[in-house]
Image: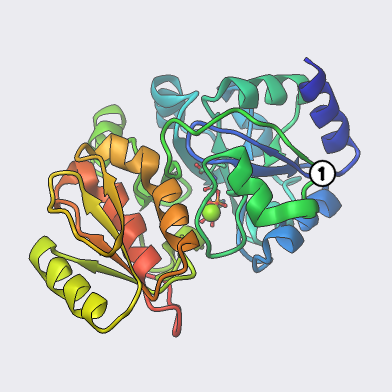
Amino acid sequence: MAGIDQAVAILRDGGLVAFPTETVYGLGADASNPQAVAKIFAAKGRPVDHPVIVHVADAAQLAQWAREVPPAVYRLAQQFWPGPLTLILRRAAHVSDFVTGGQDSVGLRVPAHPLALQLLKAFGGGIAAPSANRFGRISPTTAQHVRDELGNSVDMVLDGGACQVGIESTIVDLSGDAPALLRPGKISAAELETVLGMPLAAPQKYSPRVSGSLASHYAPHTPMRLLATDALLVEAQRRLMQGQRVAVLLLSRSAVLHGATLVHAPDDALAYAHDLYANLRSLDAARCDILLVEVPPQTQEWLAVNDRLKRAAADRCGEEET
Ligand code: TXA
Ligand code: MG
């Protein structure tokens, strides 16, 4: 395919290619080329000590990037790859500090999107790729989002339509004494525990840096607040009466609210996640004074969505890792 051939040529030449995955769009560079990986940080405006995930075509490549691959890792890979799961393993000696953020670990993932897999197979090596957004902002789930975020700083955007999952992969740290969940995602802790045969530890205090774990992340420009249904309706009315412009993300079962810029999101957690970043982007684009979001249920199936909403709404001053 012409698009893939061109993308491979750009990667081999040290350029940047944004590509679709089933979670969000990634901003890719040749993971074995430190100058190319450095361009990712420049394009995103991201601190250089934050590690990036290396995407590979299949689990057979694990041993090229990790110096130890415990049997449990192959079980997870067999069960969940290609898919929305990132495994943090002890890095092989050759892996660049730009990829690992100077840590002793490397994040690895086989994405499930057909275009991503075609690209990885044709390229042959690992593709380092964070989400293709400016640092701290909303992850892109369409090719147009990537163009809006990064403009000319990316050499090519492969368009694979809207991402199916819509929020970033689940991250499990297998580089320490006990497996730990670093970022919740579509693949739940319970599913991972079944395959691991042991409970996941809470992230350790000195767990490796995960920029998605910063208190403020995935954030729109409009100040955002998370409120329960009744409190949200009261707050929205109060602000509307003051003449403010109010954007609202409601669950579909909820009331209509006249005078606000309104989006009704699906009641189902997976469908909500699929639409989440596109909904936040379109409400942000309305340039209102405030963005009010109705808090979804506090159940396990909504864990990853609630995690992203909490960080999107977090105070941008005094950023702190949580
Ligand atoms: O779904 C996803 O994971 C998407 C798609 C493009 O694959 N990628 C993504 O990348 O969300 P990014 O960089 O936006 O978030 C990956 C997270 C970061 O917070 C990074 O710090 C963490 O993974 N990470 C990567 N390598 C790591 C490592 N060696 N140790 C700890 N955390 C790591
Ligand atoms: Mg990101």
Q: Position of residue 89 (x, y in %)?
A: 53, 43
Residue tagged 1:
155
Left/right placement of residue 25 relative to residue 205 reads: right
Q: Position of residue 27 (x, y in %)?
A: 67, 45
Q: Nearer the viewer, residue 8 or 282?
A: 282
The residue under the point 48% across, 48% down is 175
The residue under the point 65% across, 65% down is 46
User: Which image quarter holds the N terminus?
Assistant: top right
Q: For the residue labelled by badge 1, is the local secondary structure a helix, a strand or a loop?
A: loop
Quarter location, residue 45: bottom right
Q: Residue furthest top?
A: 1
For badge 1, the amino acid type reads Asp
Number of marks in picture: 1
Q: Nearer the viewer, residue 79 or 280?
A: 280
Q: Nearer the viewer, residue 11 or 161?
A: 161
Q: Is residue 75 above or below residue 233?
A: above
Q: Residue furthest left?
A: 230
Q: Position of residue 291 (x, y in %)?
A: 34, 67
Q: For the residue with label 1, is its CB less than 8 Å from the closest atom of ligand 1?
A: no
The residue under the point 19% across, 52% down is 296
Q: Is residue 242 above or below residue 208?
A: below
User: Which image quarter holds the C terminus?
Assistant: bottom left
Q: Position of residue 289 (x, y in %)?
A: 39, 76
How has the structure been colored for display?
A: rainbow
Please rate how many residues cluster around mark 1, counting C-alpha atoms within 10 Å: few if below 14, some from 14 to 19, many from 20. Answer: few
The residue under the point 71% across, 20% down is 121
Q: Is residue 282 above or below residue 112?
A: below
Can residue 258 be seen in this snapshot? yes
Can residue 210 be seen in this snapshot? no
Left/right placement of residue 144 relative to residue 299 reads: right
Q: Nearer the viewer, residue 209 or 43?
A: 43
